[in-house]
Amino acid sequence: MPQLLFGPAGIPRSTQGKSTVDGIARVHEVGLDCMEVQFVQRVAMGPAAAKQVQEAARQNNVRLSAHAPYAINLNSHEPDKLAASEQRLLLAARVGHLCGAETVNAHLAFYLGDPPAEVYQRVKTALARVVKTLREESNPIIVRPEVMGKGSQFGAIEEVLDLSAEIDGVLPTIDFSHWHARTGRYNSYAEFTEVLKQIEAKLGRRGIENMHMHISGIKYSKAGELSHLNFAEADLRYEELMRALKDTGAGGMAICESPNLEEDALVLQETYRKLNS
C-alpha cells in the first residue's frame, strides 16, 4: 500500500533555530515525515545552503517539497510580468531540486476577468514552457499547480487535473481546505471520496498514490478563502478526510497549513494511524 506522509508547511513553530536545516531536524524530532520548504515571498536560498538542506533531509529521513513564490501570474497580459513569473517558478524549481525536494507547488494565475477557457490555454502554454526548460536542464522535479480557495484565482480542481493530464511532469496539489472554502462543499467522507475518485479517473492510480495535498482549518466567505485556522477553530472534517484517504489507498505527502503547523500535522498523523491500527 502507498505510504502517506505528514508534515508542516515550513519550519515547525517549536524549532529552536530559524533555518530550514533546523526545521528539518525538528520535524524528525517530533515524529513527522516530510516538510514543505517555503519560498513563498522569494527564493533567497543559494546553492550551498540548498545542498545543506538536502543533506539534512537525507540524514533525518524527511522528504521535502517546495512552494514557489506567491508573485506568479501565468495569465499576466504584460509580457515582462509573464516572463518574470516564469522565472520565479523556474528558480523555485531549481533551488527546490538542489534541496532534494520532489515537487514544487505553485499558485499559477488569476483570471483577471478573462474567460476561464482562455486563461487555461495561456497558463498551459506558459507552464509547458517552464517544464520543458527544467527537463532540458535535467531537472526532474514535478511541478504542481495548486487547487485555489477563491473564485478569482485560477485553480479549480478540474483545471489542475486537466493540466496534469496534458503536460508531462505536472501533477496537482490538492488543497482540500481551499476546495471546501471555494465551493462551500466538499467537507464529508462522501465528498472527499468523490474528489479522490475524480483524481483517479483523470490521472489513474499514479494520481492517487503520489499525491501532494494541503490540509488546514480554514475561514471562508461566499467569495472563498479568508484565512487558515487551526482545526479546533474550524469546520473542516479532517477525520472523515483521513478515512477517505485510507479507504482510497492514497499515498504521498499531506502538508499541514494550520497556523500551529506541526501540532495539527501530528493530529492528522495520529488520526490516520488510528485508522490503520
Image (cartoon, rainbow, N blue to C red):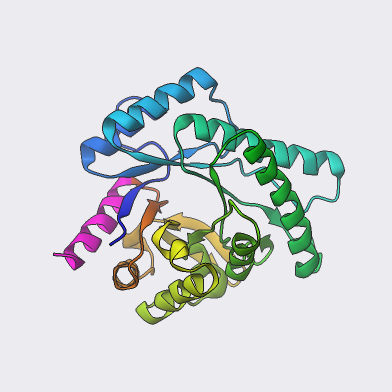
Residue at horizontal 34%, vertical 43%?
34
Residue at horizontal 72%, vertical 57%?
124
For residue 258, above or below residue 85:
below
- 265 or 221, which is in the foreground? 265
- Residue 29 in view in this figure: yes
Inspect the magenta stretch and tell me whether residue 15 lies in it.
no
**Would residue 78 be found to the left or right of residue 1 on screen?**
right
For residue 183, above or below residue 102:
below
Residue ranking furthest to the right:
78
Residue at horizontal 17%, vertical 64%?
274
Q: Quadrant of residue 140?
A: top right
| Residue 49 % position (x, y) | 47, 21
Q: How many marks?
A: 0
- 168 or 249, which is in the foreground? 168
Residue at horizontal 58%, vertical 60%?
148
- Residue 19 in view in this figure: no
For the record, the magenta segment spans: 262-277
**Would residue 224 be found to the left or right of residue 233 on screen?**
right
Which of the image's four quarters has the N terminus? bottom left
Q: Quadrant of residue 134?
A: top right
- 221 or 128, which is in the foreground? 128
Which of the image's four quarters has the C terminus? bottom left
Residue ranking furthest to the bottom:
190
- 225 or 108, which is in the foreground? 108
For residue 262, above or below residue 243:
above
| Residue 53 % position (x, y) | 41, 27
